[in-house]
Amino acid sequence: MGQSTISVQLDDTIKKQFDSLCAEFGMSASTAFNIYARTVVRQRKIPFEITAENDPFYDESNMKILKESIAQMEKYPERNVVKTLEDLEEFVDG
């Protein structure tokens, strides 16, 4: 069976913590990722729950406000104000 390489970018601190924890388990990060990939394939799902419940952005009331804002922007496109980053920096700097 052939081997393939996957490149993963991690925050430096997380990588150090992950490498250290894997070492405590007696394995490399590569072995840990292999275990993860095999589990995903075998179970045909991510082996842990992924949620956005604690993120206030995805709160039901905020989503309602966002949908209403989008509808208003679509209904009245002439009222939309577009500013570049430079425009905003100039506004802040005065």
Image (spheres, rainbow, N blue to C red):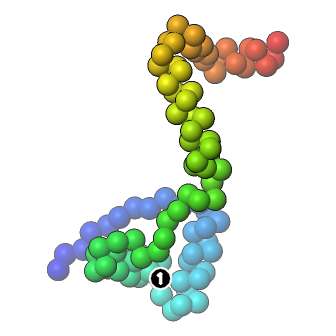
Q: Position of residue 9 (x, y in %)?
A: 49, 59
For label 1, the residue is: 28
> Residue 52 location in percent, x, y?
56, 58
Question: Picture coordinates of residue 47 (x, y %)?
Answer: 42, 76
* Location of residue 42 with respect to 73 vertically, above or below: below
Residue 48 visible within the image? yes
Q: Nearer the viewer, residue 53 or 50?
A: 53
Please tell me whether mark 1 sits on a helix, a strand or a loop.
loop
Q: Residue furthest bottom?
A: 26
Horizontal side of residue 69 vs 93, given as left or right = left
Q: Residue at x 24, y 74 (%)?
A: 3
Residue 34 appears in the picture as rendered: no
Residue beneath the point at 51% across and 12% down:
76
- Residue pushed farthest right? 94
Q: Against 10, is 85 above or below?
A: above
Q: Which of 46 and 57 lies nearest the eye of the viewer?
A: 57
- Residue drawn where x is 74% and y is 14% of the image: 90
Q: Please identify the quadrant where the N terminus is shown.
A: bottom left
- The image shows residue 71 at horizontal and vertical percentages of 49, 25
Give the quarter of the image for residue 84.
top right
Q: Amino acid at mark 1?
A: Ser
- Mark 1 neighbour density, 10 Å: few (under 14) some (14–19) many (20 or more): some
Hey, which residue is sitting farthest left in the picture? 1
